[in-house]
Each structure stands twice: as structure tokens, then as C-alpha cells.
Amino acid sequence: MVSGYTAAADPDTTAKALGKEMPISPKYAREVVGMIRGMKVETARKALEDVIAKKRPVPLKRYNKRVSHKPGVGPGRYPVKAAKHILGILNSAASNAEFKGLEVSNMAISTISVSRGRTIPGHMPRAHGRATPWNQETVNLEIIIQEVE
């Protein structure tokens, strides 16, 4: 049976959430996920809310050519759209944990992964009757949070 998750998890101590084909950039989603991986749920929520409010930059580890440095981070940006979608899935996982009767305040992100979803094809009209591909990238995201001592 395929569950759609990349990692196996104990249902008694974990909660899961899955987001499919979210219309965000795979590159920024990967960087935001790398920033919050391993954090406690409340800390990750605060970090994502700070990114949305443009108070905390996301350090860009991989796609950082010609990116200006931010104080205390190095090359970084504020991917607000990606942070909003990831925060929504994190809140969903926390709600699933509450529904199971788990204590959300002492849970941490044990697995969080991003993969490219399907590309929605589109085009943009150009001069002289031509067109350029203008595709919409999508992202599949999974979060598994687990109780920690």
C-alpha cells in the first residue's frame, strides 16, 4: 500500500501532513524547508511568521549567485509565498497531532521534504506572433512531526 510519504512513522508518537501541487517555487521551498528542518513546531512557526513579515531572511545555500547579503545570514531572501504555504502545512500537521491527543508544545519536525510537482504548462505572447513558455512550477511537501523529550 502506498501512503504517499517518503518516511515510515510510528502513528502513536507522530503526526503527518501532506501538501500536493502547491503553486510555489521549488527552489525557494527547498531553502525554506532547509531552514526549519529539525526545529520544534513553535520555533518553526515563529521563524516562518518572521519570514512572512520580512523580519528574518532565509539563508540561500544553493541558489545564491548575485544575491545580496542580509545581516547575520549571508546571502538570503524573503520568500513570502513559499513560507505561507509551508506554514499552512505545518499548522495542519500540528492540528492532526492535537486531534490524536498529542502535546504539540513538545513536538519537533522529524521529517520534512520537498519534491517537484507537475508543471502546469502555459505561454506568454511575444512580438511578431511568437510565444514563450510561461509554465507554473508546483511543489509536493510532506511534514512529519514527532514528540521529543
Image (cartoon, grey):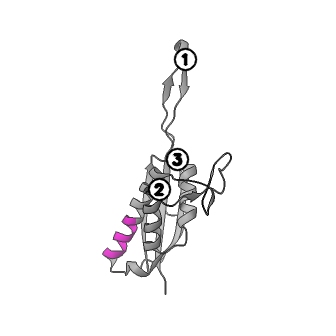
Residue lying at the far front of the rendered structure: 71
Marks 2 and 3, how far apart at CA? 18 Å
> Which tag is nearer the camera, tag 2 or tag 3?
2
Q: Which residues are magenta?
A: 91-99
Label 2 or label 3, whichever comes before in sequence order: 3
Residue lying at the far top of the rendered structure: 128
| Secondary structure that dominates the magenta span | helix
The answer to which of 53 and 85 lies nearer the viewer is 53
The image quadrant of residue 66 is top right
Q: Amino acid at mark 1?
A: Arg
Label number found at residue 54: 2
> Which tag is nearer the camera, tag 2 or tag 1?
2
Q: Residues within 10 Å of mark 2 (few under 14, many from 20)?
A: some
Q: Secondary structure at mark 1?
A: loop
Relative to residue 120, is residue 62 drawn left or right?
A: right
Relative to residue 77, is residue 80 drawn left or right?
A: left
Q: Which residue is mark 1?
A: 130
Marks 2 and 1, how far apart at CA? 38 Å
The image quadrant of residue 45 is bottom left
The answer to which of 74 and 87 lies nearer the viewer is 74
Label 1 or label 3, whichever comes before in sequence order: 3
Q: Which residue is mark 3?
A: 25
Q: Residue 32: horizontal and vertical position, in percent?
A: 54, 59
The answer to which of 11 and 79 lies nearer the viewer is 79
Q: Amino acid at mark 3?
A: Ser
Q: Residue 133: horizontal and vertical position, in percent?
A: 54, 29
Q: Is residue 98 magenta?
A: yes
Q: Is residue 81 magenta?
A: no
Q: Residue 30: horizontal and vertical position, in percent?
A: 57, 56
